[in-house]
Image (cartoon, grey):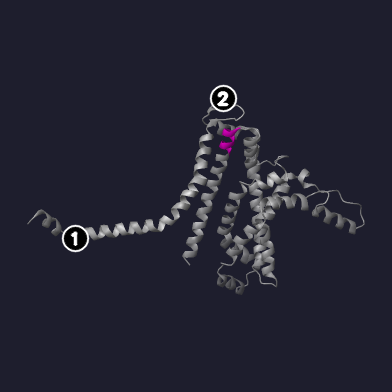
Amino acid sequence: MTTATARISRPGHATATPSRNKASRERALAWARRAPLLPALIFLIIVTQLPFVVTLIISFLNWNSLSPNTTGFAGLQNYVTVLTDPDLRQAIFTTILLTVAVVLASLVIGLGLALLLDKKFIGRGLARTLLIAPFLVVPVAAALIWKHALLNPTYGLINGVLTWIWSLFGSDAPPQLDLLSQAPLMAVIISLVWQWTPFMMLILLAGLQSRPMDTVEAAQMDGATPWAIFRHLTLPHLRQYLELGGLLGAIYIVQNFDAVFTLTSGGLGTANLPYAIYQTFYYANEYGLASAAGVVVVIGTILVATFALRTVFSLFKKEAAR
């Protein structure tokens, strides 16, 4: 028997070639499915990842465009400055306070509106459309609406309504309410809550409409009060939706620049970290320090996004298990 014949007659050799061909075909089909996505992936890497790598490199440099001769390697000094500089540290604190306040207020108000829209009443579709509208407004336009049409102490709608109510009681003109100068951070929080409450409402409304109604009806037949049903059935069911809304809201609000820039220009203690980065880059021309602060924001956003993705995946698994 020849060597070639011996190889062919060896046990399992006859099926080796078809199995390899099958694996090759599967790999070819997999690449054929992925190939249409490669241009989008390459574009995404060029637009997002390469600039971040450049920013990461610059964050380790001592680079001020006004003193180009002193440019050099700074190590971790820029990151130490971000965490120790009083202004930047105050910006970090303002960012945390702004994010927590807006997310919590939006969740609470959004939950109340979602519970209202979950009921059947005449005009529910129109009410839902009107409540969603603030989220569809361009952020800069929303900030301009609050700055000029609502909060302006001279011709703003809020002071106009207060003056009208005051006049009904025959009293003198009320003191002018000027939140932009008396409580500027509160003005920024109110404008962001107005814009982000519809987003929270939509997420929580989707959670309410996915409740197992047979359990709710059984509790009602057993004599459970609406508060008991909300506390023991509705709220535990909405826990993951509340977490998802809070995490997604935090990802976007921690990067907010439009409201701070438009309403207060970062003055009177309202400068958050994105606005402080803007000032450091464009006014102080400290490219290395601004890049380090930007990397800190990105790291914080990635941490929050990681928890958000875990919550999303747990919701998907929960829905798939039904």
Which residue shows up at 37% across the image and 57% down it?
30
Image-based side of 19 in relation to 304, left or right: left
Residue 288: in magenta span: yes
Labels 2 and 1: the sequence-earlier one: 1
Which residue shows up at 53% across the image and 31% down it?
61
Q: Main secondary structure of the magenta part?
A: helix
Front tag of 2 and 1: 2
Residue 169: in magenta span: no
Image-based side of 16 in relation to 318, left or right: left
Q: Are marks 2 and 1 in contact (CB under 8 Å)?
A: no
Residue 108 appears in the rendering: no
Q: Choose between 144 and 28: the one closer to the eye.
A: 28
**Can you give x and y, in whole percent of width and height, for residue 149 in the image?**
77, 53
Which residue shows up at 58% across the image and 27% down it?
68
**Can you give x and y, in whole percent of width and height, for residue 33 in the image?**
40, 58
Callout 1 crowding tier (Cα within 10 Å): few <14, some 14–19, many ≥20: few
Q: Choose between 23 and 200: the one closer to the eye.
A: 23
Residue at the extreme top: 69
Which SS class for mark 2? Answer: helix
**Can you give x and y, in whole percent of width and height, for residue 244 in the image?**
56, 56
Q: Which segment did they paint magenta?
A: 286-293
The amino acid pointed to by label 1 is Ala
Q: Which residue is under mark 2?
A: 69
- Measured in 3D between alpha carbons, the distance from the residue under mark 2 to the one under mark 1, in whole angstroms, is 72 Å
Vertical relation: 124 (above or below) 163: below
Q: Which residue is under mark 1?
A: 14
**Can you give x and y, in whole percent of width and height, for residue 154 in the image?**
83, 49
Callout 2 crowding tier (Cα within 10 Å): few <14, some 14–19, many ≥20: few
Image-based side of 18 in relation to 83, left or right: left
The amino acid pointed to by label 2 is Asn
Q: Quadrant of residue 299?
A: top right
Which residue shows up at 52% across the image and 41% down it?
52
